[in-house]
Image (cartoon, helix red, strand yellow):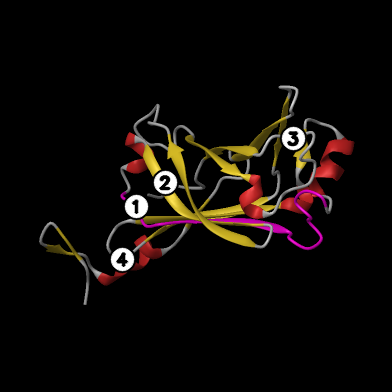
């Protein structure tokens, strides 16, 4: 039976189009992170290999899925820091090659108005519910004409990322800037 919005039935062919996931534009999407050393220095990196999409659910709400490759992580243009980040004492890319985030269903207006984006983050073999903050959009069509900007912090200890404790603080800050491939949700 077709879903209804404001009392109007949505034809099946329209529902099929809505259900198709909209992928991320790889040229304009960036997933970064920041750590702090115990001496106050910032260590910044990013995940150049990523995948993800926005899915429109039958009730019209959206769900986001993000997958990041730990084997490709880059740190401040430093090959040494990148190797350490990929290594056994941090992301352990050989055993945990992916980080995944799957949001809870949310209203489409979140990308425009900003607010909380809650979902399940799986990293280093551990899954936990986390909440990130979506900033209010700077344009009428966020994800198309401007980035959807999302920030959040997680405790690396919660995920067993306990290497380099003497040098690094526990907090990892994620910074995401997402654009969609086409005129999706």
Which image quadrant is residue 58 in? bottom left
Dots 1 and 4: beta carbons under 8 Å? no
Dots 1 and 2: beta carbons under 8 Å? yes
Q: Residues within 10 Å of mark 3 (few under 14, many from 20)?
A: some
The residue identified by callout 2 is: 117
Q: Nearer the viewer, mark 1 or mark 3?
A: 3
Q: Is residue 134 left or right of residue 12?
A: right
**Residue 168 bears which disc, if any?**
3
Q: Indicate the position of residue 122 as horizontal and vertical percent values.
A: 59, 58
Q: Main secondary structure of the magenta part?
A: loop
**Does residue 95 sit above or below 149 in this rendering?**
below
Q: Is residue 122 left or right of residue 5?
A: right
- Disc 2 from disc 4: Cα separation: 19 Å
The residue identified by callout 1 is: 106
Residue at the spot 34% in from the left edge and 42% down from the top edge:
110
Q: Residues within 10 Å of mark 1 (few under 14, many from 20)?
A: some
- Disc 2 from disc 3: Cα separation: 27 Å
Question: Which element is circle 3 on?
Answer: loop
Closer to the chain start, of discs 1 and 3, is 1
Name the quarter where the N terminus is drawn. bottom left
Which image quadrant is residue 98 in? bottom right
Question: Does any portion of residue 30 appear in the rendered image?
Answer: yes
**Residue 58 bears which disc, if any?**
4
**Does residue 50 sit above or below 78 in this rendering?**
below
- Disc 1 from disc 4: Cα separation: 12 Å
Q: Is residue 169 left or right of residue 60?
A: right
Q: Which residues are magenta?
A: 89-107
């Amino acid at each position: 039976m077709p879903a209804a919005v404001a009392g109007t039935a949505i034809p099946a062919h329209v529902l099929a189009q809505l259900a198709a996931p909209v992928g991320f534009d790889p040229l304009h999407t960036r997933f970064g992170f920041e750590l702090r050393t115990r001496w106050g220095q910032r260590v910044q990196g990013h995940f150049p290999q990523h995948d993800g999409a926005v899915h429109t659910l039958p009730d019209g709400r959206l769900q986001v899925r993000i997958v990041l490759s730990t084997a490709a992580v880059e740190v401040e243009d430093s090959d040494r820091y990148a190797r350490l980040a990929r290594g056994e004492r941090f992301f352990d890319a050989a055993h945990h090659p992916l980080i995944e985030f799957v949001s809870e269903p949310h209203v489409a207006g979140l990308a425009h108005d900003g607010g909380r984006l809650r979902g399940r983050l799986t990293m280093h073999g551990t899954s936990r519910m986390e909440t990130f903050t979506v900033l209010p959009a700077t344009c009428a069509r966020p994800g198309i004409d401007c980035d959807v900007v999302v920030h959040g912090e997680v405790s690396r200890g919660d995920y067993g990322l306990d290497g380099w404790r003497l040098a690094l603080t526990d907090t990892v800050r994620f910074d995401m800037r997402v654009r969609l491939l086409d005129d999706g949700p």
